Image: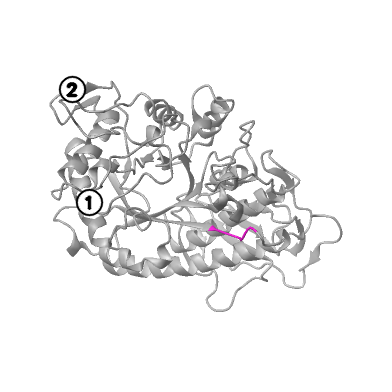
Amino acid sequence: MNEGSPLDLTYAPVQIDWNGPTRPMNSSPTLQVVVNPLLKRGSPIHERAFAELRQLGAENARFVPWFPYPHYSIAALHAPANGKTSWDFSKIDPFTIDFLEATRGHAVSLNFSTIPPWMFKIDEPPVYPDDPDQTAWFYQKGHELRDPSLKEISDYFARLVSWYTRGGFTDELGAEHKSGHHYPLAYWDVLNEPDFEHDTQPSQYTERYDAIVSAIRAVDPSIKFIGLSLALPGRAPQFFEHFLDPRNHKPGIPLDMISYHFYAMPAADEPWETRPYTCFAQADGFITMTRYVETIRQRLSPATQTTINEVGVILGEDLEQSLPGYEFTPFPDFYWNLAAGIYAYLFAHCATLGIEYLGQSQLVGYPSQFPSVTMLDWETGAPNARFRALELLKKHFGPGGEVILPPAGVPFFPPQYHAQAFRAADGTRKLLLINKRLQPLELRLEGWDGAQVEAVDVLSGSAPARAERMDGERLRLNGLAVAVLSLP
């Protein structure tokens, strides 16, 4: 990929107007951790995975016990019957406690999003696999909740919160369940991708959000809430219009934060050499959509913050994983750099828009469980370029200082790369560079002679970002590189 001469773009030097318009920097890079069997205690990569999460130290990391593993995501698999409930945290706690311990000292958000299926009006009781490690993609059925008062669903989530923050709870039949857990919890993410699940309409989601929030606040009034978490926000603008309008909520219900998701999705039959073009073009479409969402938010609920808490690339090959006869096809090593570049590119744009958090998805994936979104090697637990790029962004960027806003009008840089400048709180000038092409580039950076350069690229591989110092104003930017330049 990096053989031969780089594309010479020195004819158009990178020039930054440090006296131009700025906005306060309030964006943080973070990630989500999705529960799956490779994060179980005793798995070959368990210790390494949580050690890497602990060392990263991200703020507002998102923990997602996702629905395909019902034994790991639903604390009461069956409705109360015959004087008994089915509350059982024995399979859920190990994942959750390991996450909370690895992120101790940092704000986190929990997203126990799966509504127990027996709470819906369904013809047959839910059937789960006996093996908790086996995926179950199709057990979620029903549209209308069986309890129109919403007390059943809201009490369920309030008890989950009480289990982890108040040492236990009293169940529906009056029995006490003690956990001994007293973890601080900054955010509760209310449900997940309602535009995908249970044919949920905006008014239904808003009613459920209000009920769940009210019940959780009675347990712990300090918790803040994240709403929506839409899968395809560009196809569901009605959710934003309805949810962000305070008139559609009960009095006193907070709208602390909204979230939505983005995955670039190149087709499985697309040649690898053109997939970078596709992914960055789709990212540009998402950035445009984000600007529209921001307009809605600012009009209806300007104090509400935003976390785009799932960002990544899902290869078309991954979408076949639930089909009979699925076989994993390895992808080229440079793919990890492509996915890292997409995340860094979106972070640069989101910083100019004031988005508070951008969460890369996900810590661990593997064949049959979205291998293209993993940040760690599923055999060794070692970080790949996606994790290293997140590590690099977290090292250099976070709230404080300023974002140098790009000029309005036509794109300021050639289409082969993107550059975004920042001024840190201590006055250090920083430049985030992303090569959007497989081919290396030769750039001329006016005023950056002597800058420290840290880059995640094919030369750094799975190692931490490699460092060098500029000697002059020319910089070779390897294919699909993510680089940060620093200069006092």
Disc 2 element: strand
Q: Residue furthest front?
A: 124
Residue type at tag 2:
Glu
> Can the viewer see residue 147 in this picture?
yes
Q: Residue furthest right?
A: 4
What is the x, y in percent for residue 107? 38, 39
Q: Which residue is mark 2?
A: 176
What is the x, y in percent for residue 307? 40, 53
Q: Which label sits on residue 193?
A: none
Q: Could you say which is closer to the camera, residue 125 or residue 33?
A: 125
Q: Could you say which is closer to the camera, residue 134 or residue 346?
A: 134
Q: Could you say which is closer to the camera, residue 345 or residue 438?
A: 438
Q: Which residue is mark 1?
A: 208
Looking at the image, residue 48 sits to the left or right of residue 453; the answer is left
Query: Would you place residue 102 above or below residue 334 in this image?
Result: above
What residue range appears in magenta?
Answer: 264-268
Q: Is residue 319 magenta?
A: no
Looking at the image, residue 380 sits to the left or right of residue 132; the answer is right
**First of labels 1, 2 by sequence position:** 2
Residue at x 39%, y 42% (from the top left corner): 67
- The quadrant holding residue 152 is top left
Residue type at tag 1:
Arg
